[in-house]
Amino acid sequence: MGAVAAAVGPWSLAGRKGYAATADTPALQFITPSEYRFIAEMAKEIIPAEPVLSGQVDPAKNIDNFFAGQNYNPDFLIMFRYLRLIRMANPMIPALKKLVPATYKDIMDFKRTISFLGYYSDANGEADLPPEKRIVWPRLGYGGPKPEDWWPPDKEDQLDRALLVDRIKEAGL
Amino acid sequence: MKKTITYQDITSGQVAGPVDVCIIGSGAGGSVMAHYLTRAGLKVAVLEKGGYFPPEELGRKEVTLLTRIEGMTIFSPATGEHTRVSLITGECVGGGTVASESVTWNFPLPVLDDWERMGLKSWARSSRLAGMQEELNQLLSVRPVEMTSHNGCNQILMIGAEREGLSWKSIDRPVTSCMRCGNCTQGCHYGVKQDAANTFLTWAQEKGCDIYSGTKAVKLSVNYPGPDDMPYREKLKTASGAAKDDLLRELLQRAKAAPAKFTITAEVMDVKKPVPRSGQRECKTLTVHARQVVMAANPIGSVRLLLKSGINPHGVVGQRFTTHPTSMQCGRFGKNLQLNGWDGMNDSIEVHHYAYVNKDKPYYQPEKHGFLFEGALSLPWGIANLLPGWGQEHLALMADMNHLACIEVNVKSDQYGVITPDGIRFDISEADNERQLFGTWLAGRMFFRCGAKQVFTGIPGLVLDSPSQLDQIYKQGRGKRKGYMQKQANMYSGHVFGGCIMGTDPESSFADETGECHELKGLWVADGSAFPTNVGVNCAMSIMFAGRKIAADFIAKTKKTA
């Protein structure tokens, strides 16, 4: 059904004013409910982290927010063309994996790119949140944007060379 | 810099000029031209497709800023039979200089020698050119990064290189009091990066240059030809007496009827609003009349505008496109090594032992060498895309983000492609692939020299767990295609060249050695498009240098004509 919806495509893009919330989708400003469902499902496969599985972080909604409010570049919209192709190809992915591995890899790479956009990048909305309210970035140890009153240390931490074991030397290569 | 002229400031159908010079593009080349031409007393207008982002709107956000200040072909890469290279160019007031990591190399002297051998005699090493280079370095406060300012990721490259016996360099940067926030590629939030918006464009504005932002030139019209333009140049050569007088009179009458030789039609958009899903923003039309035009919209923008305008003498426009295809290698280190590569100055060490700048060294092998290593780590989205796999395996890798270091292998390609109205055809050569493979192998060694637990290569599917696996780099491939000669290899570049190159022969080049079009006088090219070869190093300064030299030639020629 998803593949059929992708083939039909979202019509009248210019005139569309968004979608009200339904039982299984939140209110959307930019992507369609069927795109939302596809991305949400895909994100769970690509990023099976607890916040995604529990719904605490919603990469699909983040993507909707990002495109509705943050994206200034038409090139990023090409992503939706690929999304449409991938939705059409989705039922055939197991066959593609066996028969055309390069195409399978391309599809999975695209699934990764868009899922990661909604989860790891600032499209996740965490740049504008205080550190204690962030969910994704603390799990990576990523500090996010520097606060306005930030000042750099006098110098960067210098690595302890004794910790850097020369494995080439060890292996005699 | 002062406010630029935007969508809000003009009425649809507005006409500007005639100006002495209209510069299309405000990056490394266009900004330098704008500065020197306004300083010479010319009335200059600059048209920039992207928006103006003051420091307070820059930095900090990975993807948000990517969509604001960079033009991309991430989702529509340069593609050939077996290659895919995503190209990234600046698309804002200041162009690529705003989004670059600020790595600054003087224009490489071996490349000047190559250009001289190609017949571009005025590009030969000289005290005049050396003086121009020095002047730019002083104007932009270029200086090397202090040793204590290298972050963990760059220290890995430095130590790895030392242990491998390779020379390295603490890079030069045009920055005053760098805050080392790690967000250079999102533009400088502190306004200390000496990008084109903070320097040349500001100075040009102070001298009366008009800078239009959100203004995309869509057509360049030639209102009348001159006696030195084709086909009149040839006609006048053979004509004599009354026939010649008639021709000259005809040219004069056509010139009198038009406001200026060139007219640029542009669409002005509010580029500081999200782009709608239809991709079409509302726009107003702006017409600029100009006596002379400088193309500086990077190779892709300049070529496409010329092709769209039907200006393609001898079919040379779009030809000889080239780039520095780059791959990224990633080393995963133990939990005891806190690298935080996203923090601190990005790309502050470069290993240039095998770079083209060393082509005269006895060890240099042209078929295998010709690449730079750069220490660089991306922000979370970039890193996530770089690391292999998905699911739990990928989550575990991302949890180690602070124990990763990356090395870019930046190849000086010897291959040429073609820019067309709707695509870019480009394939790396067999030698480029060899350079990438050797660079990947060496990067792997440098990581293992520093104790890496794993190395994720840029070759699809190749992860190395120990130094003994390094030779796999030369074996990995798909069918007959080895290494990077497969479209699944993730290569990218922010360095683009060619498409309107300088040369001596009008049949094979667009412009003469001064940057002026052979066949249409008053039309100039002053950015990477004019380069007949790539340069093999980070190119913002090289393009500024070319802009400086072309500006000097422009002024000299214009004075002579006047």
Image (cartoon, coloured by chain):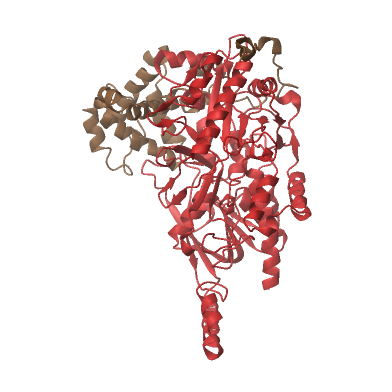
Q: Is residue B203 left or right of residue B90?
A: right
Which quadrant would the C terminus of chain B be assigned to in this image? bottom right
Residue B102 in the image: above or below residue B379:
below
Q: Residue at x 60, y 39 (%)?
A: B366
Q: Is residue B314 above or below residue B135?
A: below
User: Which residue is nearer to you in this view: B423 or B200?
Assistant: B423
Q: Find residue B407 and report its image quarter.
A: top right
Above or below, comparing residue B265 to residue B78 in the picture: below
Q: Position of residue B535 (x, y in %)?
A: 62, 44
Across and down, in percent, residue B199 comes to 69, 46
Q: Is residue B176 above or below residue A144?
A: below
- Using the rendered image of the protein, determine whether residue B307 is visible from the camera's viewpoint: yes
- Viewer-proximal residue among B133 and B451: B451
Hue used for the chain lettered A: brown
Residue drawn at x 56%, y 24% is: B441
Horizontal side of B480 relative to A38 (left or right) equals right
Colour chain B appears in: red
Whether residue B218 is visible to the viewer of this picture, yes or no, is no
In the rendered image, residue A164, in percent from the top left (x then y), is placed at 66, 12
Q: Give the mark count.
A: 0
Describe residue B12's horizontal placement relative to residue B102 as left or right: left
Instruction: Give coordinates of residue A2: x percent, y percent.
Output: 24, 28
Residue B216 appears left or right of A37: right
Depth check: give the residue in front, B361 or A153. B361
